[in-house]
Amino acid sequence: MCLGIPGQIVAVTDETRMMALAEVSGVRREVNVACVLDRPIGDLVGEWALIHVGFAMALIDADEAAKTLEALRDLGEAQEALEAMEAGQKALEGQS
Amino acid sequence: MCLGIPGQIVAVTDETRMMALAEVSGVRREVNVACVLDRPIGDLVGEWALIHVGFAMALIDADEAAKTLEALRDLGEAQEALEAMEAGQKALEGQS
Amino acid sequence: MTRPARLRDTRVTLSHGGGGRAMRDLIDEVFTCTFRPDAMEDQARLHDAALAEPGARLAMTTDSFVVTPLEFPGGDIGKLAVCGTVNDLAVGGARPLWLSAAFIIEEGTEVALLRRVVASMDQEARLAGVRIVTGDTKVVGRGAADGLFVTTTGVGVIPPGRNIGAVHIRPGDVAIVNGVLGDHGATILAARGDLALSTDLRSDCQGLGHLMEAVIAAAPDTRAARDATRGGLASALNEMAEAAGLGIEIDETALPLRTEVTGMCEILGLDPLYLANEGTLVVFVPEDQAEAALAAMRARPEGSGAAIIGRALDTHPGQVRMRTAFGGSRIVDMLVGEQLPRIC
Amino acid sequence: MTRPARLRDTRVTLSHGGGGRAMRDLIDEVFTCTFRPDAMEDQARLHDAALAEPGARLAMTTDSFVVTPLEFPGGDIGKLAVCGTVNDLAVGGARPLWLSAAFIIEEGTEVALLRRVVASMDQEARLAGVRIVTGDTKVVGRGAADGLFVTTTGVGVIPPGRNIGAVHIRPGDVAIVNGVLGDHGATILAARGDLALSTDLRSDCQGLGHLMEAVIAAAPDTRAARDATRGGLASALNEMAEAAGLGIEIDETALPLRTEVTGMCEILGLDPLYLANEGTLVVFVPEDQAEAALAAMRARPEGSGAAIIGRALDTHPGQVRMRTAFGGSRIVDMLVGEQLPRIC
Amino acid sequence: MKYATEFRDPKAAKAVLARIAAVADEIGATRAAPVHIMEICGGHTHAIFRYGLDKLVHEGIEFIHGPGCPVCVLPMARVDECVEIAERPEVVFTTFGDAMRVPGTRKSLMQAKADGADIRMVYSPLDALELARRNPDREVVFFGLGFETTTPSTALAIQQAAREGLENFSVFCNHITVPEPIKALLDDPHMVLDGFIGPGHVSMVIGTHPYDFIARDYAKPIAVAGFEPLDLLQSVLMVLEQIRDGRAEVENQYARVVPEHGNPVSLAAMADVYERRPSFEWRGLGEIDASGLRIRPVYAAYDAEEKFGVGYAAGPRNVAEPEGCACGQVMTGRIKPTACPQFGRGCTPEMPLGALMVSSEGACAAYWQYGGARATEAAE
Amino acid sequence: MKYATEFRDPKAAKAVLARIAAVADEIGATRAAPVHIMEICGGHTHAIFRYGLDKLVHEGIEFIHGPGCPVCVLPMARVDECVEIAERPEVVFTTFGDAMRVPGTRKSLMQAKADGADIRMVYSPLDALELARRNPDREVVFFGLGFETTTPSTALAIQQAAREGLENFSVFCNHITVPEPIKALLDDPHMVLDGFIGPGHVSMVIGTHPYDFIARDYAKPIAVAGFEPLDLLQSVLMVLEQIRDGRAEVENQYARVVPEHGNPVSLAAMADVYERRPSFEWRGLGEIDASGLRIRPVYAAYDAEEKFGVGYAAGPRNVAEPEGCACGQVMTGRIKPTACPQFGRGCTPEMPLGALMVSSEGACAAYWQYGGARATEAAE
Ligand code: SF4
Ligand code: SF4
Ligand SMILES: [Mg+2]
Ligand SMILES: [Mg+2]
Ligand SMILES: [Mg+2]
Ligand SMILES: [Mg+2]
Ligand SMILES: [Mg+2]
Ligand SMILES: [Mg+2]
Ligand SMILES: [Mg+2]
Ligand SMILES: [Mg+2]
Ligand SMILES: [Mg+2]
Ligand SMILES: [Mg+2]
């Protein structure tokens, strides 16, 4: 459940009500940033957040994202190596 | 001003609120009869009234209506007699 | 189409307008199952030999229907939508062939009402000898339309050599109407209920295609005809006088009027000449063909109340005058807006 | 028409619908002064030699337009009403000739808005090479319509020997779209304002008549075409698969999509395959004519974003499947109702 | 239609017309030196044109159209107030159709409705009352408009609302009375009036005695008349015969409907609900003492002036009449509509400057609609 | 789209799928004896079908669709209450689009809207708040629906309304929590579950610790997952590897969004506004202790249950589920949608019997829309 979309905070629109403009692929909407207000609101600009029902619910951790992608990439390389190995083995065994 | 139309009271619809059904040439509408309530409301049925903005404002006096028509008719007859006289006179005078 | 019914809603929802399966079900089970168009494409493909005849012309006309209430004594919006467009073709001398029908439906409208309207369109189309060949449905939110609007467009063929139009009227031509005036307008006024008037009136709503053909057969030099819808006979005559550049004179005592219509006009201060009709036309024919045209009308049920009501004159061009029952004469102008019930 | 302007109201009142002079003034000074129909009769009388050609057929289609808001980035209801009906003619292989236009106007609508809508209809009609030959206006009370509804009906001619329709699709035929998907639907969603989304999107609203002629010239055996309006590409393809009795397979990676449209779909949980288009068609051509058709499309501005997106198959008849970008496959069914923005 | 058709008989008319011509000749009335008879009531004006009586009567008789159209005599400021009340979001403004097209400074009620105000036409104040019952969350205001004929119905509606304790019904009272402006006209040294046709439906309520001053103080004949063409013609004859005989009396042509002393129930209801305003402004006639009615304080809960703080009592409101219009002069019978420089030019029914052009009883509307003007222009 | 497109890369998927297949083979999973992995969240179910993951993964892996669709688990009685509130004339009922088509006993909200109720779809509770500000004369009710992901937004909206003193805004609170039904499923002796995919967006709010009991008390592996296809596949792999290694841990695949301890602001807002109900009824699962939230008395002014006297607290409401439907069993993963006797017969998206057929996250809807059912039937 709970459709959530990464969006970038591009401007502060109402400091008192903790509202900012988020952009998802060129589509902009005002969102509430209360849940991610771990710093002065202006410093959120440029950050990526997970947007749900008009609220920025979490900031997206770029390092963690990179780590996850890294792990996937490693998996891919391991797999390629494995396949190359298997291919080599098969070739050795004479199976075309 | 003050468009008023003769209509016949054909039924009582609400004694408390003094409402009755009036009919004008087959068109019926509920009207207030407070202004013509000089008798038990049921006895109004069959009477002709002058209807204005949804109220029966006056009962129509059949005798007076007849008298007015009578006067008009007399006028007509007098006029015919006069014209006949004039015609006779003209004929006498040789004017075709 | 023998598959089991899928449309089980009793009222139309926005889902039925979304372009998906619910819409298809509504269209299949209310509209196309009755109108039975030839193909599933969103356009009708048509052929009629009469159109290919040298000198034949195609006639095209359209009207949106927005009546309140949707059903009323003597008809409903569907019957109106077919008759109105058939009549606009017929009064121009065209033989009606095909109709399109577009429906704008307010969310919450009863499916059963739609079915009745569609059935009544189908019946009128059959009577008129036209086919409803293509259509469209849109659903709008509650409060974004008043129940149902229907727009019909008609295509017909004008046979070679037939030229019917107000510009052809000549001085001395006789004006004939096919029946009593104002029934539709008075019926709708009463049916709306907000004036709390009740009557036994019924709308005159009817197709006039066959009547027009009968008139033209009897009076081959029929000049012009018009159906006296919105704005009533007065507006139709004014438009014709203007287009012809002639005067028109009508005779108050010759106008066919129903007692109840007169009564309603007296109560509300209205003039029956401006009340709408939906099955009443006025036709101009040469004087020497007037009796034939009148007899042809009277021979048909749509024309049983036909009457000669006046004639065209070369005086007061562009104006309509009426000899009053009282012996006077007055201009019968076009209305400005709509007639409003009045008390003074 | 050099007489001084009589229409001085800035907003439409009920008087403008009453069938009287106020209505005439509105019609004269807003509608007929722009569309310039031939005559004052309430029907157009038309002739076109192409219709008389042996084997030629007449095509007829109608649509009501009910868009909110009436004006939006990239178009307005008038442009939609002309393009939509021209396109329904064109995708069936007909050359559009004539349109009728019926207007249902809510009391209080700005006259200036009507003028803009009419001007935009006139411009689109010129671009498409069609004439608006007859029309109608109705005025309904406040709250009885949502500003303005326009119903257009189009008549065109299908040249002899031209047979375009979903039943002609054969297995192996290639599906081509002329450009990006969903721009209109996404633009309207944003323009309504109630979701508080803002974008730089514009509706794709455009006439496709010339494009269709170019495709047919380049690919003489063009099988079928459909404009992917309400219900989007998914609905158009499903209808075609059903009518053809064939399966259709499309490739997700081949679908032309604008970033903002994808973004809006992600935010609202919508699928761009179901978003409405108003200037996007899908055409099926034989495989050996696909490149020619594609090139012909790309040579025109309406087709500059054209792409081959899939093909017809003799497997899974009546179904549309999509190879996903991820390597899977899924059915692309028709929607039930409309797509609703969702949060889960 | 009983009591109507009989009074439209063309044969009888011929006789009356002949008698009128005879008497007119007797007293030497000519086109150049006509007898000036004012039909006070706009309904009579309407009937004169509808039946073409002006062209049927002897050319020595000239009808002067009086101020008896309640819509026409209302200053623009009153229309502006209607619009202001109607534009309040909580208000359902109800009115007779007659008032819909009357121009205000900014707009007419018809235009205000198009702009979004909730304005509904009703046939009766009872219908407004019913709307109030059915919409307890809305404020239903009824535009009380008209002379003594209409005034009792509004009074009875207010009494009924009070009986039911309806809290969301009020009347914007602009009722006016007939005798006072007549007196004002008779006091104007520029007016030439030889006799009057009295408004029969007003007398149905107030009787004939309120006109005694016309005969007694100003020595002018008057016949209280019905609204059918024969009623009107007979009244003209009555006035002419009085002139011929040197009499000045209040005669009652419309005895089938008009009782000498009026209708007691109506009079009682009016006395209960209304009191006279010290003065009231009339278009073209200015302020006239005691010519308007307002709702008594005891019924203040039903008084829209009190409820919304607008209206005549709220203070003077200087609204200039449109430039170049001659409404006031036409209203008071000083000039014919065709003599107004705006008639058919700046002022047409499509785009009126004055109420006279759009009220069904307005003289300008009658001239326009029935061709009083254009008939003269056209070659016959 | 940053943070989305990268996680949809088909090439990377190939590798993960190969690893999954390898591990599945290692642990001996086959079509006949598959590993049962429950994706708790309906969003995951949706993604599985949208990307065709069920057909891409090794045949020894069977996805069991969990109860994580907030619309699907709502008993019909709750929908009926929505309709009742929405049908009050003063109410503007606002809801996410998701709830519009869910069948109630009499009607869905979509049908109630067609019947005249003022029902509006909103994207955010903030939009409902704005409607309340703009329509001070109407009662704006927001249908608070969803798991812990959505709950904070409603809480923040209520706090904002309280700050502004808005008197015409209230929430019909039907928020529910994820851990309790999972525990109920695990306690069911008939369920065979080998591991879980945890709902990433719920954990974004509550963190990962609330799932500790799954590993600790039931010895089942769980990976909290994101919603892109690579996220899901990686999570499946994590679960398989735990099974292979004999581990039972709570792993966090979605660390870019999910903090171990959740979001403190959200948790504080929830604690401030809501308290747990003693128990709450779930479709197919019956009453589950402490699984639902209600608004605290201090915010009673914003509680639609209090304002209108309806809802769960108002007492039991016995609404029978439609005859022959297997919603409960499908909801809890006991059977596949195609095994429901009504699937595609009495129950279609056009005329649904259960919410599962119309919610975008419902398993029946997914099977229908993406051909889970019909794809199997059709010859390939
Ligand atoms: S023509 Fe117009 S401006 Fe002139 S008096 Fe009549 S209403 Fe007034
Ligand atoms: S098919 Fe319908 S009845 Fe059966 S489980 Fe799914 S939603 Fe319930
Ligand atoms: Mg027409
Ligand atoms: Mg017509
Ligand atoms: Mg269509
Ligand atoms: Mg409605
Ligand atoms: Mg009139
Ligand atoms: Mg079409
Ligand atoms: Mg179309
Ligand atoms: Mg028309
Ligand atoms: Mg509107
Ligand atoms: Mg989807």
Image (tube, coloured by chain):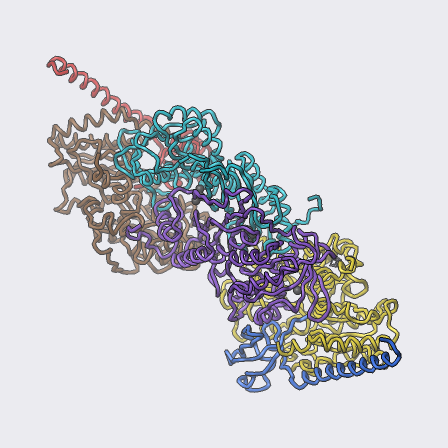
Chain colours: A red, B blue, C purple, D cyan, E yellow, F brown
The percent coordinates of residue E203 (x first, y second) are 70, 78
Instruction: Indicate whether F149 appears above or below E368.
Output: above
Q: Quadrant of the C terminus of chain F?
A: top left
From the viewer's perspective, tell me whether residue F342 is left or right of residue A54: left
Which residue occupies the foreground of this view, D312 or D308? D312
**Image quadrant of residue D255?**
top left
Numbered-mark total = 0
* Residue in the image at 32% along x and 58% along y: F106
State ligand 9's quadrant. Answer: top left
The percent coordinates of residue C214 (x first, y second) are 54, 58
Which residue occupies the foreground of this view, F258 or D324? D324
Instruction: Indicate whether F3 appears above or below D277.
Output: above
The percent coordinates of residue F119 (x first, y second) are 41, 52
Which residue occupies the foreground of this view, D247 or B44? D247
Which residue occupies the foreground of this view, F161 or E277? E277
**Image quadrant of residue D258?**
top left
**Image quadrant of residue D297?**
top left
User: Looking at the image, can residue F268 be seen?
Assistant: no
From the viewer's perspective, tell me whether residue F290 is left or right of residue C129: left
From the viewer's perspective, tell me whether residue D10 is left or right of residue F183: right
User: Looking at the image, can residue E129 be seen?
Assistant: yes
Instruction: Indicate whether E63 appears above or below A65.
Output: below
Q: Quadrant of the N terminus of chain F?
A: top left
The percent coordinates of residue C211 (x first, y second) are 53, 59
